[in-house]
Image (tube, grey):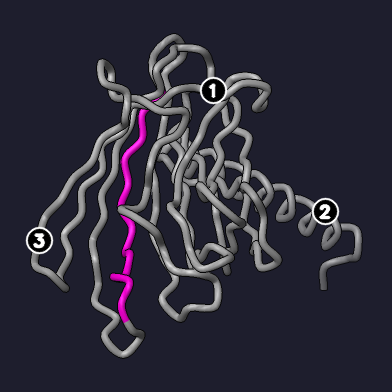
Amino acid sequence: MPNISDLLTTNTANIATNATAAANAVTAAASAGAYEVVSDAAYTSGSSAIDFTVEPDYFYTLEFMGVGITAGGAELEVAVSHDSFSTTKNIQYWISRHDIWSNTEAHQKGGDSNYYFNAYGRLSYGNISGDTDPQSVHGLIHFAQKTGDYMTYFGTIQQPTNVSAESNFPQSVRSCGRVMSTDSINRIRLKPNNANIVASRVRLLRRS
């Protein structure tokens, strides 16, 4: 029969081995490109904007579910800053949609006549639904910046057409954009162009 000292020694060794294996698994997952959850929250009371802290040399994915805009709806936009929104960077953006309701394709770009940029990038084609409408928006955006280079993003959302809920026709909207500066971006903002944004869940993921 083994004595207590031997059992404690064996148990301690097993704990150390398991801890090392767990640490190695985390390291392996990170090196393999596993995502880290930076933020995961609901915004059901309404916010003028939802801000996230970011840094260069990482690949980020912003996922959102159940997004609506108070006061009947508005456009959904993204904005970025290198100084925690003391200033806002200009973005060149391109957005396209396929509308199953009218069977049409359409696209838009930023408004400046020479370089087609604004102080935001559009994510929706026209208004998304209000927060009391059962046609909330779901989607995701990927974005990244290499130090000393331009931040870029691309993404897609499922944006229902603004018709009755009984005829809730799907609409595919795709967007991409480039920040017009090589400054290191440290904030990204999800916002409406009017009123407040609500969301049942918004999650920011980061991968090295």
Residue type at mark 1: give it: Ile
Residue at 26% across, 55% down: 173
Of callouts 2 and 1, the N-terminal one:
2
In the image, residue 197 lies in the stretch drawn in magenta: no
Magenta stretch: give its range: 151-163
The quadrant of the image that shows the N terminus is bottom right
Residue 25 located left or right of residue 146: right
Residue 45 located left or right of residue 146: right
Q: Are marks 1 and 3 in contact (CB under 8 Å)?
A: no
- Residue 185 is tagged as 1
- Residue 9 is tagged as 2
Residue tagged by mark 3?
Answer: 104
155 w.r.t. 111: above or below: below
Of callouts 1 and 3, the N-terminal one:
3
**Rendering coords of residue 53 (x, y %):** 63, 34
The image quarter containing residue 110 is top left
**Rendering coords of residue 43 (x, y %):** 65, 62
Mark 2 or 1: the one toward you: 1
